[in-house]
Image (cartoon, helix red, strand yellow):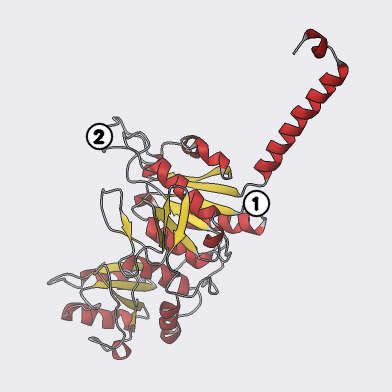
């Protein structure tokens, strides 16, 4: 451009208009992107290790804004913001953190602060948190959990890819109305069905009874099936900060197991006991007698199985009506505990409790 053109007032004005128009278009395009809030709880995905080539690390060290910074390309598909809910390894996950997380999710959707939510979480109890949220979040808007098996400082950290995939799952229109999901290692899993299957491998999750419901790959999301249970049924509990959940413990059955644990829990006056039985929720004679004592003390006893797949059948090898127990259906012991805790806030009637397990 000549010096004469530069000094031309009309040209200056035209250039200013073009720049303003360009900025306006960019701002408008950004405003049209879906709003995603990432709620961080810590875990391996936020872990830092002393060496990039070793497995040792400390969970929950890296703040959420730094994690978002590892995937700059995500800004092209969504407006991202992050909040730090907790900074713990998921082995230290607590009911208080669950409540804080659930209350914040419900608040975000009640106030229309976001179109989708992603939760970063350690893998050890991720399946429990996902199921808990599925039972207490009434919105049909997406809530997607993810994490990693390798810390952020590792040579081949899987966290950034998992986080990117989780965001693409969360903003996909077909995700709405599917309840809480877990997105991990390119698989998409229903919160009720998902289970951690490996201690160290990056393909750590699967759903033994139903398989993955979809796949996230190369920015694309494909769904194969829906949840085996009713999508977004009325939730068992509306959480507040003051909500106190009943105490429910898990007892593990094994060969020649003594009934000491059950008797201890009876002495502690717990509200419920889930027995991780063998096979079809079975247990030995010592457990049988202890269960009778627990039921007589007013404790709700739920039969589950330590087997990773299959159902515990009502009135099959054990007469539940005579014994006074209920069954978990195909819920794992850890998820049966969560459902029983929530259900006991509504009723202690065994028929109603059993129907809850067949519904959720």
Can residue 165 be spotted in the picture?
yes
The disc label shown at residue 162, or none:
none
Vertical arrangement, residue 97 with respect to residue 258, above or below: above
Query: Mark 2: which secondary structure?
Result: loop
- What residue is shown at x 30% (from left), y 83% (from top)? 313
Q: Position of residue 322 (x, y in %)?
A: 29, 91
Work out whether residue 205 or residue 9 is closer to the camera in this orientation and state it. 9
Instruction: Name the quadrant of the C terminus.
Output: bottom left
- What residue is shown at x 41% (from left), y 72% (from top)? 340
- Residue placed furthest toward the bottom: 322
- What residue is shown at x 67% (from left), y 42% (from top)? 29
Work out how far the residue at label 1 is from the one at label 2, CA to CA, in angstroms: 40 Å
Instruction: Name the quadrant of the N terminus.
Output: top right
Q: Position of residue 154 (x, y in %)?
A: 32, 35
Q: Position of residue 106 (x, y in %)?
A: 59, 59
Quarter-of-image position of residue 348: bottom left
Vertical arrangement, residue 95 with respect to residue 52, above or below: below
- Residue placed furthest toward the left: 256
In this figure, which residue is indicated by the disc labeled 1? 113
Task: For label 1, count other residues whose C-alpha is less than 10 Å away and answer few (under 14), some (14-19) or many (20+).
Answer: some
Vertical arrangement, residue 251 with respect to residue 29, above or below: below
Work out whether residue 329 or residue 212 is closer to the camera in this orientation and state it. 212
Query: Mark 1: which secondary structure?
Result: loop
Task: For label 2, count other residues whose C-alpha is less than 10 Å away and answer few (under 14), some (14-19) or many (20+).
Answer: few
Name the side, left or right, on which 198 lies relative to 119.
left
- What residue is shown at x 26% (from left), y 32% (from top)? 53
Mark 1 / mark 2, whichever is N-terminal: 2
In this figure, which residue is indicated by the disc labeled 2? 54
């Amino acid at each position: 451009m000549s010096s004469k053109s530069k000094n031309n007032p009309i040209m200056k004005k035209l250039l200013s208009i073009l720049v303003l128009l360009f900025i306006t278009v960019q701002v408008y395009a950004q405003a049209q992107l879906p709003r995603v809030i990432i709620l961080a709880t810590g875990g391996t995905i936020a872990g830092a290790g002393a060496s990039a080539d070793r497995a040792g690390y400390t969970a929950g060290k890296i703040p959420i804004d730094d994690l978002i910074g590892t995937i700059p390309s995500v800004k092209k598909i969504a407006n991202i913001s992050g909040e730090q809910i907790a900074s713990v390894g998921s082995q230290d996950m607590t009911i208080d953190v669950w409540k804080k997380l659930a209350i914040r999710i419900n608040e975000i959707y009640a106030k229309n602060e976001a179109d989708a939510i992603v939760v970063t979480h350690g893998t050890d109890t991720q399946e429990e948190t996902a199921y808990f949220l599925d039972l207490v979040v009434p919105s049909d808007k997406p809530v997607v959990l993810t994490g990693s098996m390798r810390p952020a400082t590792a040579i081949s950290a899987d966290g950034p890819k998992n986080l990117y995939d989780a965001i693409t799952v969360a903003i996909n229109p077909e995700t709405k109305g599917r309840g809480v999901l877990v997105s991990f290692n390119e698989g998409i899993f229903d919160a009720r069905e998902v289970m951690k299957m490996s201690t160290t491998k990056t393909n750590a999750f699967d759903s033994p009874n139903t398989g993955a419901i979809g796949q996230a790959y190369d920015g694309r999301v494909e769904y194969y099936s829906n949840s085996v249970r009713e999508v977004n049924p009325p939730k068992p509990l509306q959480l507040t900060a003051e909500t106190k959940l009943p105490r429910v413990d898990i007892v593990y059955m094994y060969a020649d197991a003594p009934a000491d644990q059950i008797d201890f829990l009876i002495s502690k006056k717990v509200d419920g006991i889930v027995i991780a039985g063998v096979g079809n929720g079975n247990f030995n004679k010592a457990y049988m007698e202890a269960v009778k004592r627990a039921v007589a003390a007013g404790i709700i006893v739920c039969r589950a199985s330590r087997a990773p797949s299959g159902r515990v059948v009502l009135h099959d090898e054990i007469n539940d009506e005579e014994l006074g127990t209920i069954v978990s259906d195909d819920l794992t012991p850890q998820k049966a505990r969560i459902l029983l805790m929530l259900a006991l806030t509504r009723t202690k009637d065994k028929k109603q409790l059993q129907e809850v397990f067949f519904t959720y």
